Image: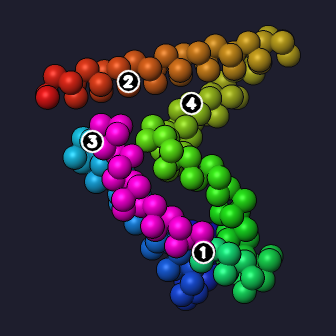
Amino acid sequence: MDAVKANPQDAEAVKMVTRMDALFLVDREARLQQLGVEERLALRREHAEPWAEEIRQECVALSKMALPKSALGQAAAYTLNMWTKLRGCFDYAEVELSNNLAENSMRPVALGRKNWLHVGSAQAGPKVAAIISVVESCRRLAYRRRNTYWTSCRA
């Protein structure tokens, strides 16, 4: 996305973003159909995996063609460096392509940081972080259980 923002006329960057959008469309379709874990994984492997392989091959080609310090060269290098983590979504359907959930769960911490300066001591910071981590984990588990319950009730 940054490469397209830096140069909207860069056809290679636009093509790459289009390919990546296709990956997210597969997950969107799985959510719309309310697919279970195995069905979501099968849908990803059938439709998204070919797109992912095309993205990897194109990144290899772009990394050889683009200047290493250019936005496109850095994007291709980053994608290739993170490739094994991206591939995790084809092994585990629970893994999301986007990290938006994680970022959104961290937002209250970032926004509240200045408000928590009064916590008292340097030792309090790690303790607060541990407490927030436990609370957020509980929220995630409750959300997952609630969705699993409603999905099973509909069936």
At label 3, which amino acid type do we have? Leu
Q: Are marks 4 and 1 in contact (CB under 8 Å)?
A: no
* Magenta range: 36-57
Q: Residue at x 35, y 49 (%)?
A: 42
Q: Main secondary structure of the magenta part?
A: helix
At label 4, which amino acid type do we have? Pro
**Along the polypeptide, which appears first: circle 2 or circle 4?**
4
How far is mark 2 from mark 3, CA to CA? 16 Å
Label 3: element kind: loop
Residue 47: image location, x then y, percent: 36, 62
Residue 144: image location, x then y, percent: 38, 25
Label 3 neighbour load within 10 Å: few <14, some 14-19, many 20+: some
Label 2: element kind: helix
Residue 149: image location, x then y, percent: 25, 20
**Residue on which the image places disc 3:** 35
Label 4: element kind: helix
**Residue on which the image places disc 2:** 143
**Along the polypeptide, which appears first: circle 1 or circle 2?**
1
Label 1 neighbour load within 10 Å: few <14, some 14-19, many 20+: few
- In the image, residue 2 sits, relative to residue 150, either above or below, namely below
How far is mark 4 from mark 3, CA to CA? 30 Å
At label 2, which amino acid type do we have? Tyr
**Foreground disc of the pair 4, 1:** 1
Q: Are marks 4 and 3 in contact (CB under 8 Å)?
A: no
How far is mark 1 from mark 2, CA to CA? 37 Å
- In the image, residue 26 sits, relative to residue 19, either above or below, namely above
Q: Quadrant of the N terminus?
A: bottom right
**Residue on which the image places disc 4:** 108
**Residue on which the image places disc 1:** 57
At label 1, which amino acid type do we have? Gln
